[in-house]
Structures are given as C-alpha cells and as structure tokens.
Image (cartoon, helix red, strand yellow):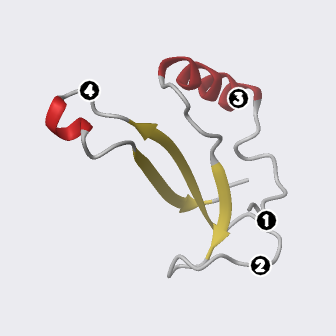
C-alpha cells in the first residue's frame, strides 16, 4: 500500500520507463512507493518533501535449467530508499 500523495514516481517520464521495463521483463509488477523513517518503518501519515521514500518492484523468475527448474518459480524483489526532494 502506498501513502504517497505527491507526484514523485508518477511523471510521464517515469511511466514511460516503467512501460519499457514491463515490455522487457515478463510479469513485472507495478512499483510500490512508501514513505519510511530512517529505520525503514512505513510512516502512516502523508509523505512530504524531505522524508525518506522506498520504491520496490517484484517479478517472478522461473529458471530454465533442469536442476534449478525443480525449485519452481522465485519471486525476485528489489527496493531502493532515498530522500524525497519534491
């Protein structure tokens, strides 16, 4: 869930990059944007400039090699945290 109410992550440029990445990576999910404190805990109030934001994204991965393929599908997830500037 997102508690983000500013325009960060919602610009036309960002949407174009996400669309391109979704074309390259099968089943890539939509990014999540959350306001967090320095320890990484989600802030329940509205995000404002100067607070930390965390952007995360996930995509399923199924290995095609015989041995790794036995493990099934893995859900790969990555996130990054930065100070919100606007």
x and y percentages locating residue 85 in the rendered image: 66, 56
Report crowding for label 4: few under 14, some 14 to 19, many 20 or more residues within 10 A (C-alpha).
few
Mark 3, residue position: 15
Residue 10 place in picture, x, y as percent: 76, 39
- Distance from disc 1 to disc 3, alpha carbons, whole Å, reads 19 Å
Q: Are marks 2 and 1 in contact (CB under 8 Å)?
A: yes
Q: Mark on residue 3?
A: 1
Can you identify the residue that label 2 sits on? 44
Q: Looking at the image, do the residues carrying marks 3 and 4 touch, with CB atoms under 8 Å apart?
A: no
- Residue closest to the eye, 54 or 27: 27
Contact between labelled residues 3 and 1, with CB atoms less than 8 Å apart: no
CA–CA distance in space, label 2 to label 1: 7 Å
The answer to whether residue 51 shows anywhere in this view is: no
Tell me, yes or no, whether the two marked residues, 3 and 2, touch with CB atoms within 8 Å: no
Q: Nearer the viewer, mark 3 or mark 4?
A: 4
Residue drawn 53% across and 76% down? Answer: 40
N-terminal-most mark, 1 or 3 = 1
Element assignment for label 4: loop
Is 46 rendered above or below residue 84? below
Q: Secondary structure at mark 1?
A: loop
């Amino acid at each position: 869930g997102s508690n983000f109410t500013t325009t960060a992550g919602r610009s036309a440029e960002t949407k174009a990059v996400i669309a391109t990445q979704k074309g390259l990576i099968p089943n890539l999910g939509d990014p999540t944007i959350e306001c967090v404190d320095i320890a990484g805990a989600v802030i329940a109030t509205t995000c404002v400039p100067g607070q930390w934001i965390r952007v995360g994204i996930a995509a399923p991965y199924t290995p095609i090699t015989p041995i790794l393929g036995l493990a099934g599908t893995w859900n790969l997830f990555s996130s990054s945290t930065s100070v919100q500037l606007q």
